[in-house]
Image (cartoon, rainbow, N blue to C red):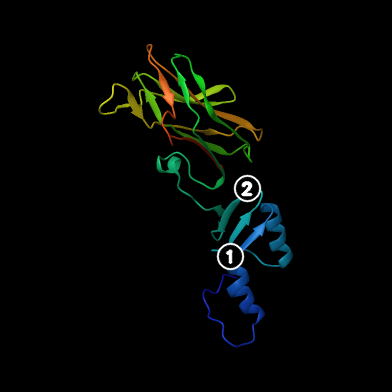
Amino acid sequence: MPGLGVRNFTTEVLTSANVNGYLMQQSVMNFADAATRTAQFSAAGISPSAGMMSYRTDIGALEIFTGSTWKALAVTSAAAAAGAYTGTPIQIGRLTFTNLTTTTSSSLIDATGGAYTFTPKLATSRLEVVAELLMQSSSQGSSAAINRDGTVLTYQNQAHQFYAGTSDLYSRPTVSWFGPAVSTAAQVFKVQIRAYNGGSITINQGTNWESHLTITEWAA
C-alpha cells in the first residue's frame, strides 16, 4: 500500500498500520541489489507502491518505484547539462594537483602529478572525465589532453587568451571526455600537454595555482 503521508504523533497507541504507513513504507530502504529487494518484498507478502525509495549498495544508487518499475533518480552534471548523460552517479573521483610542468615538446607529455587511477564499479557504466587546468603558454597552438591507459581520449587546441601586460598567454581550459567504462579493471587517467611551433607551455606556474581531474561514473 502507498505511504500515508505526514502525521504528528501524540500520546497514543502506535498501531502496526501506522508504523507501516507512516514509517516503514516512507523510509529509504537499503538492499544489497535488485534481486535481494525483490526477494524481501516477496517474503514480506507485499508489493512496492509508487513513491517508495530504496538504496542499492551494489551500485551506490537511489531508486524510486514509479508504480510499475524501479527507476534511478536523475542527477544533473556538466555532461547532463550538455545533453550527454543523465542517470545515477555511481561514484566520483577527484584529483587536485599543483605540480609544475613546463615543456617545449610538440608531442604530448604527462603533466607531473596529473595521473589518477580510477576503478569503475560496472563495465556497462559511462564515464565523464573533466580536466580543469591552469596554464601559461607562449603560443596559441598549445594543447591539453586526457589519456586513458596510454590512449588519448580527447584533446583541446588553442584554448588560450591574452593576459594584459604580458606577451604570454594564460588560460583555464576545460577538457572533457564522455564514454564507456569498458571494464571494471583499474584504469589510469592522465592529463597531458604539448607546445606548438617552438613555444612553451606550463601548468601550475604560480603560487597557489592548481589544476583538477574529475571522473564521474554514471549508471547506464
Looking at the image, residue 91 lies above or below residue 210: below
Instruction: Return the residue nearer the eye: 119 or 179.
Output: 119
Q: Name the residue located 61 percent from the left edge and 59 percent from the top edge.
A: 54
Question: Sequence-wise, which precedes: disc 1 or disc 2?
Answer: 1
Give coordinates of residue 146: x percent, y percent: 50, 27
The residue at which mark 1 appears reads as: 49
Q: CA distance from mark 1 to mark 2?
A: 22 Å
Residue 78 quadrant: top left
Q: Residues within 10 Å of mark 1 (few under 14, many from 20)?
A: some
Residue lying furthest front in this view?
Answer: 207
Residue 165 is tagged as: none
Q: Name the residue located 59 percent from the left edge and 51 percent from the top edge.
A: 61
Please name the amino acid that badge 1 sits on.
Answer: Ser
* Left or right of residue 44, residue 133 in this image: left
Q: Name the residue located 39 percent from the left edge and 31 percent from the top edge.
A: 173
Say what secondary structure mark 2 lies in. Answer: loop
Instruction: Return the residue nearer the eye: 216 or 73.
Output: 216
Say what secondary structure mark 1 lies in. Answer: loop
Please name the amino acid that badge 2 sits on.
Answer: Ile
The residue at which mark 2 appears reads as: 59
